[in-house]
């Protein structure tokens, strides 16, 4: 068996394992001991890693990128649907995992780099706008779910690597300043999201 075939099987296996761990419901079984029922938190962490690695391997090893691209687009649609539409907590709790892994696969396989860069930058700007609006708590809480996937796609598709690095560093700096400044509580409350978004973008662009 070739290395490519092994990686394809591994990516599918990780996708299945990640999906099973992501949608486990051990925490809802009241008959289990409390310590054991809380293992679902650990399983969701493993699911996050499994889905992310599966997205990377699928984008690299499968020759037909169209299937991976379509799957990633479907994942983005599903993720945003779980995020903003009324869904059970089990589904809404999986939105970030789906958006994160789908953003990786989409950024690595899309051929419409310019369009993807524009759309992802708009998504990041919308997410930052959601951080500072005060009309809807739902939008405020979902801001990070837009910033992180948007930064991932932007860092993967934008052609000018230096500009990506500078934007990421700027977000990191703004996040640190917001966390350290003693004047406005709203900046302190949103500093971590900016810091994490910039750090994610910097890590991605540094390894692409």
Image (cartoon, rainbow, N blue to C red):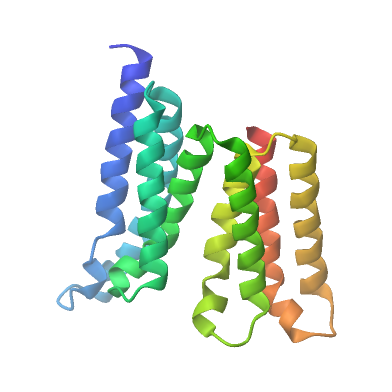
Query: In the rendered view of the protein, which quadrant contains the N terminus?
Result: top left
Residue 56: x and y, percent?
A: 46, 35
Q: Position of residue 190 (x, y in %)?
A: 68, 74
Q: Quadrant of residue 177?
A: bottom right
In this picture, is 66 found above or below 94?
A: above
Q: Quadrant of residue 127?
A: bottom right
In the rendered image, is residue 184 in sight? Answer: yes
Between residues 42 and 33, which one lies in front from this camera angle?
Answer: 42
Spot occupied by residue 92 in the image (x, y as percentages of width and height): 36, 69
Instruction: Please state the total of marks drawn on the protein image.
Output: 0
Residue depicted at x 28% and y 27%: 9
Q: Residue furthest bottom?
A: 135
Q: Residue at x 65, y 43 (%)?
A: 155
Farthest-out residue, left: 31
- Residue 140 vs residue 91: left or right? right
Percent position (x, y) of residue 84? 41, 72
The C terminus is located in which quarter? top right
Name which quarter of the figure residue 159 lies in.
top right
What residue lies at 63% left-to-right and 58% top-to-bottom? 122
Asked whether residue 204 appears in the rendered view, the answer is no
In the image, residue 179 sits, relative to residue 53, either above or below, namely below
Q: What residue is shown at x 42% (from left), y 62% (from top)?
A: 80
**Depth order, front residue of 17/145:** 145
**Left/right of residue 200 with respect to residue 13 in the rendered view:** right
């Amino acid at each position: 068996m070739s290395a490519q075939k092994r990686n394809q099987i591994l990516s599918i296996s990780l996708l299945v394992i990640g999906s099973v761990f992501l949608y486990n419901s051990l925490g809802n079984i009241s008959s289990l001991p409390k310590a054991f029922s809380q293992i679902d938190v650990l399983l969701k962490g493993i699911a996050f890693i499994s889905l992310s690695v599966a997205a990377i391997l699928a984008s690299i090893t499968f020759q037909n990128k169209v299937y991976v691209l379509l799957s990633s687009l479907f994942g983005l649609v599903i993720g945003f649907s779980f995020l903003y539409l009324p869904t059970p907590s089990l589904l809404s709790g999986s939105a970030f995992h789906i958006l994160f892994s789908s953003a990786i696969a989409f950024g690595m396989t899309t051929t419409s780099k310019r369009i993807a860069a524009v759309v992802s930058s708009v998504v990041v700007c919308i997410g930052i706008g959601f951080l500072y609006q005060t009309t809807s708590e739902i939008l405020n809480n979902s801001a990070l779910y837009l910033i992180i996937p948007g930064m991932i796609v932007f860092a993967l598709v934008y052609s000018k690597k230096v500009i990506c690095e500078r934007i990421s560093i700027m977000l990191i700096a703004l996040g640190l300043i917001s966390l350290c400044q003693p004047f406005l509580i709203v900046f302190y409350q949103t500093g971590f999201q900016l810091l994490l978004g910039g750090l994610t973008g910097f890590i991605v662009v540094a390894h692409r």
